[in-house]
Every structure is written in C-alpha cells, then in structure tokens.
Image (tube, grey):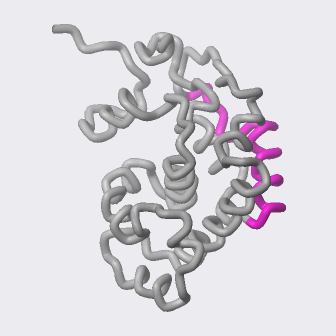
C-alpha cells in the first residue's frame, strides 16, 4: 500500500495527518464550525497549530462546545475560570476575545443571515485555488486576508490579524493551499 503524496507540513504526526487529510482546506460552511475555527486560529497566534489541535477537545469543553449564543452571554467570572484550565492556552486577552468575537459573530449573522454567507462573499462563494509546488512558497498573508482582517476588526473582532485570517482562510477552504502534488489538491 503506497502512502499518498501530501503536503509536507503534517510530518509523521498521525493527528496532524488526519487533520490535513480530513479537514484542512475543505470548504467549511457551518457557522458554529467557522466560529470555532476562527477562535482557535486566534489562540494559535504565536504557537504551532499542532499545539492547538492537541488541545482542541479541551477548548471545546472549556468553551461550551463553541456555542455562540452561550459564549456571547458569558460573565467575566466564567471567562476568568478558563484561566485556571490547564487544558487550554491560558492567555487572558485571547480568552476574553472569545466572548467579544461571539458577540461580533452574532451581529454578522443578524446583518448577513449567516457568517458563512458573509465570509464566503470575499471569494465569490468559490475557493481560490492556488498552485504552489512547495510549502515554503505559501504566503503568511495576502491582500485579501489584510482586507478581511480590517473588516473583522471594524466589526469588533479581536485576534483576527492578517496572518490569522489567512490561516483561517486556508483551514476553512476559502483558499486551496495544498501543494499541487498533494492528493488533496484536486479534491
């Protein structure tokens, strides 16, 4: 049985390989999953994605399964409790951003009908397909991620810089950044 050719970044880590093969770059349209991904990308800032991936279930447990309505109404005490949770990244600003972003997310849903419609409009509802042959050629940000970042910040979001937004775009499938030789590229 031959191992399929894939992007090099997952290395040999089974969790990372499963994430690459089953999630990363697949068009995501569920608002709750988009919210979870945006929050986790914010927590990833300054860290490696595998660190977040290994703690993802802990994040889900700590943050009410990323239930946007619940999180938008969390008290300061509930947010502070998360600072005691060793299973997640205990950064006060990132934890406080969860409630802030839930509130901003709901405002987008109310204005546009869904966050999905709002975010996918940036790419005319179709993934951007890049044609990189090596992982080192992938950009950390693009003009579009800069624009999305500025727009999200104007709408009240925190931890949505251009690099975070580009990582989000890649993970949510708004952009296909699998290298061209990766078996997931054509899917």
List the single residue furthest toward the left: 1
Residue 142 drawn in magenta? yes
User: Residue shown at 37%/69% (left/top)?
Assistant: 88
The answer to whether 74 is drawn above or below residue 149 in the figure is below
Quadrant occupied by the N terminus: top left
Residue 39 x %, y %:
54, 59
* Drawn side of residue 39 relative to residue 118, left or right: left
Q: Is residue 15 left or right of residue 24?
A: left
Magenta-tinted stretch: 136-156
Q: Is residue 83 magenta?
A: no
Please tell me which residue is depicted at 57% across the width and 31% down the height of the picture.
Answer: 173
Q: For this rendering, which residue is in front, 100 or 106? A: 106
Where residue 144 sits in the image (x, y, percent)?
78, 37
Which residue does the image show at 57% across and 78% down from the upper left?
A: 73
| Number of marks drawn | 0
Dominant SS in magenta: helix
């Amino acid at each position: 049985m031959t191992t399929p050719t894939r992007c090099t970044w997952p290395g040999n880590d089974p969790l990372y390989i499963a994430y690459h093969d089953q999630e990363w770059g697949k068009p995501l349209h569920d608002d709750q999953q988009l919210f979870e991904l945006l929050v986790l990308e914010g927590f990833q800032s300054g860290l490696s994605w595998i660190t977040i991936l290994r703690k993802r279930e802990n994040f889900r447990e700590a943050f009410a399964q990323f239930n946007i309505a619940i999180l938008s109404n969390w008290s300061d005490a509930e947010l502070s409790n998360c600072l005691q949770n060793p299973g997640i990244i205990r950064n006060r600003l990132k934890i406080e951003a969860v409630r802030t972003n839930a509130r901003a997310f709901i405002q987008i849903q109310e204005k546009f009908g869904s966050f999905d419609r709002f975010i996918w409009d940036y790419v005319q509802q179709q993934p951007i397909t890049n044609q990189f042959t090596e992982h080192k050629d992938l950009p950390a940000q693009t003009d579009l991620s800069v624009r999305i970042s500025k727009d999200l910040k104007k709408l009240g979001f925190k931890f949505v810089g251009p690099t975070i937004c580009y990582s989000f775009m890649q993970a949510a499938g708004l952009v296909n950044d699998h290298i061209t030789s990766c078996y997931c590229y054509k899917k």
